[in-house]
Image (tube, rainbow, N blue to C red):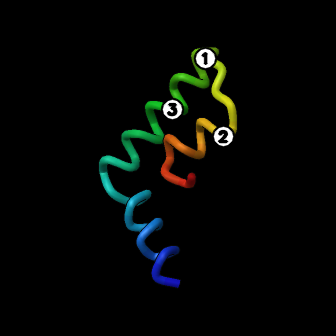
Amino acid sequence: MAAAYLLRLKHESLAGKREATRVMKEMDGGKKVRLRDLARQLGHA
């Protein structure tokens, strides 16, 4: 339960939102990102 709360706090932080935005812009721009790499960038791995 605590891990889920901490993960949510990370994603709701300004830095977490900026990282997600950067990754999404790269994907929209055509840059290929493997799911494993995306999970690592977002802190899921």
Q: Earlier in the sequence, mark 1 or mark 2?
A: 1
Q: Position of residue 4 (x, y in %)?
A: 52, 74
Task: Residue type at mark 1: give it.
Answer: Lys
- What is the number of the mark on residue 23? 3
Is the C-beta separation of discs 2 and 3 under 8 Å? no
Residue under pointer 2: 36
Residue 39, quarter of the rendered image = top right
Q: Position of residue 1 (x, y in %)?
A: 53, 84
**Left or right: 15 with respect to 26?**
left
Mark positioned earlier in the residue sequence (3 or 1)? 3
Residue occupying image coordinates x 44% and y 31%: 22
The disc placed on residue 11 is: none
Report the side of 32 relative to 8 (left or right).
right
Residue at 50% over, 41% down: 41
For the point 59% across and 38% down, the residue is 38
Q: Nearer the viewer, mark 1 or mark 2?
A: 2
Q: Quadrant of residue 21?
A: top left
